[in-house]
């Protein structure tokens, strides 16, 4: 459906997206996750053909988005981060314009506009000026323009941002409906939303794809890191003594509790649940366990772990980045990774001038440079 | 392209920019037609066109400033870029919509000719030719405004720069009179024009070699002419600047009633060049 090969984007000398390769299959909802400045918006803009690449290839249903842009873009509906609306038009006029620009005419156009209005529940406001609509309705108009004409692939950049809880539920239900007809790619900062909607998750960090799989597979890959937290009614030394009798547990930290006793945080070994042995060890010692919480790895943990080891954004210009600078991926350092992502060499990672903080703040706010 | 054209016209009329501009142009054209034809009993409206030309200095920046700058400012450029339409067609759609808005009041003004025809002998063909030339002159100015709008994200900045440029173009015939006619002065002025042209070419193509090559080739030709026979350059700058003037060319239509084909071709060429440059400028931003 979408095939991305070695996608790279430089803004001046800063690398926003670095050598991204992935494939998007039909009939799934893909979730793009990543911290600010990870390159999600840049990647989505390039997938939609709104931004040119520095290097790499994007094939949409076999059509290259740069050599055959019209053929490729016909398959795509795109909602950017800020809905691209004309406030002086009504939603009906706006959708007619987008439909017409997508090549629809006459009765087909009217039907497509009517369907989009019905799907996004815009009928009540379809004849009001967009400038008078609330944020939620504007977002819905944005989604309607992405869905008009029934494109195979719908790309939504943070579709629920700024909506009230009721509207969020409506938009999520709409996205699920859209996925029945084609493929949806969405980006979001809300992990629970991605967890609920998406059956494939792609995590980006600092311009690279650090994880890409189903949620279950990602959880399995990051399993072994489940955390058991305890609050026990004894002092640290005593707790340490008891813990030494628990078999199979080697990684734990003990700290004095703010309320009473001690807090223990155990990093559970892979495929082993230490709760029973911990319970019996403390019971045998006559030390009450006041609370015990076994935390299975969540998408949040996967996200944090996947993004913490990503290489820094490259500051060298594209001309300085050579083929020899690319090395094979290091599986130990990047745990998942069912992707074609190449790790960067040390030379590629050097950052001569800007501070790390500046890099974190950059990214999704990139604008083409003028002058 | 037609979708963009329709949308642009709709937006312009809904936002009252178009009605206000049409009223503005009609007000001044009506005023000058009354003054020249009703009070001074001139049988043609061409002279009135000549007087009305300065209205374009205000109308064109107001109309063209939003064309591309606002799209980028509000983020709708991303929508346009993701639609399956060629960028050149998008720009042409916008351009023709602007030309339509400027042409509407001028076509209405042409109908004053029929009123004048009731009371005297009117050369309809000459009036029609002047109307066409006026629209073409406006179209050429709009293309310059469109290009400037493609360079910036701010509509106000685009309007101010366009107004300044059109003002210089409007006063070019007067500026020409002040230019020294010596060959050395011509050499310096033409050099400045060559460097400016080369820098614009370099900026649009992001290619320093192309920029340098353009400047080097044109400059070496100029130096060669200057060294071999500097008499050729005497008054050349004034002639060149006068040749580039948009408004000066309109006088052949308005004053002499001549349908000057070379001027028509010049207007069309300026329009084509600046629309092309606008396409290049927008594409350049997409690639950066």
Image (cartoon, coloured by chain):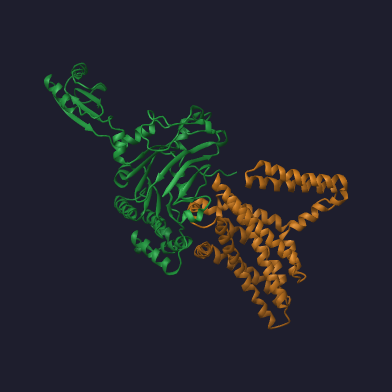
Q: Position of residue A81 (x, y in %)?
A: 42, 48
Q: Position of residue A23 (x, y in %)?
A: 41, 44
Q: Nearer the viewer, residue A187 or A216?
A: A216
Q: Position of residue A180 (x, y in %)?
A: 32, 54
Q: Position of residue B11 (x, y in %)?
A: 50, 62
> Is residue A176 left or right of A351 when viewed as pictured?
left
Count all numbered tags in the image, as a single digit: 0
**In the displayed structure, would residue B91 be above or below residue A330?**
below
- Which quadrant, please, contains the C terminus of chain A? top right
Residue B222 can be seen, yes or no: yes
Residue A88 can be seen, yes or no: no
**In the displayed structure, would residue A67 be above or below residue A191?**
below
> Is residue A340 left or right of B236 when viewed as pictured?
left
> Is residue A292 left or right of B71 when viewed as pictured?
left
**In the displayed structure, would residue B4 be above or below residue A193?**
below
Q: Give the quadrant of residue B54.
A: bottom right
In this structure image, what is the colour of chain A?
Answer: green
Q: Nearer the viewer, residue B20 or A25?
A: A25
Q: Nearer the viewer, residue A39 or B45?
A: A39
Query: Residue at point 45% right, 37% down?
Result: A207
In this structure image, what is the colour of chain B?
Answer: orange
């Amino acid at each position: 459906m979408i095939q991305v090969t070695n996608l790279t984007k430089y803004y001046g000398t800063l690398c926003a997206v670095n050598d991204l390769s992935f494939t998007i299959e039909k009939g799934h909802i893909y979730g793009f996750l990543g911290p600010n400045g990870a390159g999600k918006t840049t990647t989505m803009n390039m997938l939609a053909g709104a931004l040119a690449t520095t290097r790499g290839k994007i094939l949409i249903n076999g059509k290259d988005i740069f050599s055959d842009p019209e053929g490729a873009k016909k398959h795509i509906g795109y909602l950017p981060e800020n809905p691209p609306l004309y406030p002086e038009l009504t939603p009906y006029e706006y959708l007619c314009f987008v439909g017409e620009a997508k090549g629809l005419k006459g009765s087909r156009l009217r039907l497509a506009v009517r369907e989009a209005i019905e799907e996004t529940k815009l009928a009540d406001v379809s004849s009001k000026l967009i400038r008078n609509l609330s944020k939620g309705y504007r977002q819905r108009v944005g989604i309607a323009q992405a869905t008009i004409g029934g494109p195979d692939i719908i790309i939504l950049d943070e579709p629920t941002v700024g909506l009230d809880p009721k509207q969020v539920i409506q938009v999520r239900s709409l996205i699920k409906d859209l996925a029945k007809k084609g493929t949806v790619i969405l980006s979001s900062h809300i992990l629970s939303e991605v967890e609920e909607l998406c059956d494939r998750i792609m995590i980006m960090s600092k311009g690279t794809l650090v994880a890409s799989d189903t949620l279950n597979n990602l959880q399995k890959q990051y399993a072994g890191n489940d955390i058991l937290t305890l609050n026990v009614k004894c002092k640290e030394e005593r707790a340490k003594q008891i813990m030494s009798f628990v078999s199979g547990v080697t990684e734990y930290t003990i700290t004095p509790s703010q309320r009473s006793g001690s807090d223990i945080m155990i990093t559970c070994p892979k495929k082993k649940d230490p709760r029973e042995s911990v319970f019996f060890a403390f019971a045998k010692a006559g030390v009450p366990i006041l609370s015990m919480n076994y935390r299975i790895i969540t998408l949040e943990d996967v996200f944090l772990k996947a993004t913490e080891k990503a290489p820094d954004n490259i500051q060298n210009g594209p001309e300085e980045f050579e083929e020899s600078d690319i090395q094979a991926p290091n599986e130990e350092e990047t745990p998942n990774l069912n992707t074609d992502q190449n790790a960067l060499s040390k030379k590629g990672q050097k950052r001569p001038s800007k501070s790390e903080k500046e890099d974190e703040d950059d990214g999704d706010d990139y604008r083409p440079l003028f002058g | 392209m037609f979708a963009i054209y329709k949308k642009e016209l709709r937006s312009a009329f809904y936002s009252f920019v178009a009605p206000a501009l049409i009223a503005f142009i009609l007000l001044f054209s009506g005023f000058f037609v009354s003054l020249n034809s009703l009070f001074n009993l001139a049988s043609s409206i061409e002279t009135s066109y000549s007087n009305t030309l300065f209205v374009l200095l205000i109308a064109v920046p107001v109309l063209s400033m939003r064309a591309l700058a606002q799209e980028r400012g509000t983020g709708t450029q991303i929508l346009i870029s993701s639609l399956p339409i060629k960028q050149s067609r998008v720009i042409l759609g916008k351009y023709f919509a602007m030309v339509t808005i400027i042409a509407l009041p001028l076509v209405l003004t042409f109908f004053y000719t029929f009123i004048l025809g009731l009371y005297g002998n009117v050369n309809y063909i000459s009036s029609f030719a002047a109307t066409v030339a006026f629209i073409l002159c406006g179209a050429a100015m709009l293309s310059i405004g469109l290009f400037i709008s493609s360079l910036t994200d701010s509509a106000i900045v685009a309007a101010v720069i366009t107004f300044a440029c059109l003002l210089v173009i409007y006063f070019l015939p007067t500026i020409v009179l002040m230019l020294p006619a010596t060959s050395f002065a011509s050499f310096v002025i033409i050099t400045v024009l060559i460097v400016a042209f080369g820098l614009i070419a370099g900026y649009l193509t992001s290619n320093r070699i192309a920029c340098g090559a353009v400047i080097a080739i044109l400059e070496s030709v100029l130096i060669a002419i200057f060294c071999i026979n500097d008499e050729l350059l005497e008054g050349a700058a004034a002639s060149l600047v006068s040749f580039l003037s948009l408004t000066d060319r309109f006088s052949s239509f308005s004053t002499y009633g001549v349908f000057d084909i070379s001027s028509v071709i010049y207007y069309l060429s300026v329009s084509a060049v600046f629309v092309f440059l606008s396409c290049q400028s927008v594409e350049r931003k997409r690639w950066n």
